[in-house]
Image: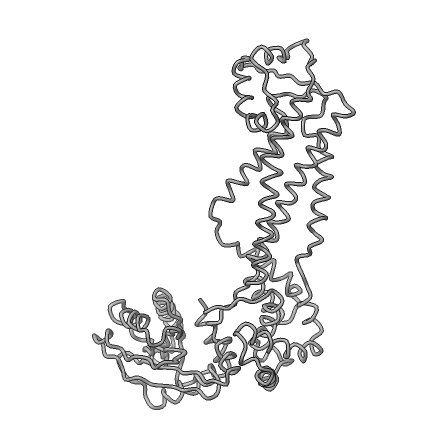
Amino acid sequence: MSATFHEDAARRVLMLQAFETAGSDSPLWTPEDRAWATRLARDSGATAAAPAQALDQRARHALERLGPREAAVPRRLGLRMWHTAWVPFVLGLAFVAGIAVDAIGGTQRINLLAPPVWAVIVWNLVVYLGLLVPRPEAPRGLRALLARRLSGGSGGSVPLRAYGVAWAQVSLPLAASRAAVLLHVAAAALALGLVAGLYARGLVLDYRAGWESTFLDPAAVRAGLAALLWPATAATGLAVPDVAGIEALRLGPGVAATAGAADWIHLYAAMLGLFVIAPRVVLALVASSRAAWRARHLSLPLQDAYFQRLLRELQDATAQVQVLPHGAAPSPQATLALREWLAAACGDGLQLRLAAPTAYGQEDSAALAEPGTTLRVLLVDLGSTPEDDTQGRLLATLKAQREAPGAALLVLADETAFRRRFAQLPERLAERRAAWQAFAAKHGAGFLGLDLDHPDTAQAEARLRAALQP
């Protein structure tokens, strides 16, 4: 499940999440503060709002208390890597740069076969082709750069760094769309400046046109120019001269260019307009529209354990967890420890239902979940070997059941016996954890290893949230 947030709302919710999930690293925000924010949001009518609105309303209340305690919070929330004023600034800068560049050469003679303006056109065509190629996920380096910029650098507090990482992850598509706006505007303005420069120089300088080649004859040159410039000739009505006209433009040793270049300047300006300025303007408008839409529809993962718990608290509801042991039932002591750990992870009022063990070979007949179940836990022994024909079939059965379509699925491995057996070989524990984690990911479930003799309840919510992350 996901919800869409406005950009400012997503910032507030992620900032509060960073402080509420920092644990002991965030003494500025206590469990009492958290309960106060939830209660105030609930009393303010957040329970009647959509999930995104309810979470934002709670974050607004919380940040009013957190802001005075940590001065960096309002500064980070106000930090923007995008300003609309950048568009006219980039447009003006690129336009001036285009005027400053001589697009047809450093002399007053235009070589019809090799004017520099073709480099601009070819480069833009390469860019258009690149836009048609599916692009991979943004590199980690770019995400890290955004995170450092948004968190105030490596010297920021733990919650602020966590906020920077989270916001960089969520906002990267929006940042990419906004960067595309600037790039397309810059390219269009640069080409427009080139056109303006062509005509400005043509007003005060006498440009002459000609061509020279070792290998091409006039017929080949005429055919090539006619093919390359046909869009411009169709748009302007100016025709490429016939073979005799092209022959008259041929240059050689001791032969200077004498033909006027006005028509050729018109043709090359039209080519820039057709293949650079117009397409880039359209692409800039598309990117701007996409950026505006993304700024209003940022997605946060509400299947995350943190958000699930908050939404239950805002609705004054409780978590309903079903535990399905595989192979054998847990001991009474392990059951109590598991209940304690799940209560710390999912919140007070936990409703825990322990199903009968699913025997090996009976994976297709796993216990059904009751309506309202929020989390289904497949309890296994870490010492067992994950197999597609047993645990894999059981996970497939759980995923196919329609009784709990919105319930998260977690493979929880009891490490107690395995730890005792291989106490002197910690690498064996790491290897078995890795095997189970890869197996769970393969079947679309989260994974968590837990020593039910000594469950760590202090980090229960954070560990559950990390285990259920996509």
Residue 37 place in picture, x, y as percent: 60, 82
Q: Nearer the viewer, residue 238 or 100?
A: 238
Residue 446 place in picture, x, y as percent: 40, 71
Q: Residue furthest top?
A: 254
Name the colouring of the figure.
one colour
Q: In this view, does 256 lie above or below 359?
A: above
Q: Quadrant of residue 355?
A: bottom left
Residue 383 place in picture, x, y as percent: 31, 75
Q: In this view, does 242 lie to the left or right of 353?
A: right
Name the quarter where the C terminus is drawn.
Answer: bottom left
Q: Quadrant of residue 111?
A: top right
Residue 114 place in picture, x, y as percent: 61, 24
Name the quarter where the N terminus is drawn.
Answer: bottom left
Q: In which quarter of the image is residue 175?
A: bottom right
Residue occupying the point 62% across, 21% down: 112
Residue occupying the point 64% across, 11% down: 252
Q: In this view, does 207 lie above or below 434?
A: above
Q: Which residue lies furthest to the right in this view?
A: 204
Q: Is residue 365 left or right of residue 112?
A: left
Residue occupying the point 48% across, 51% down: 136
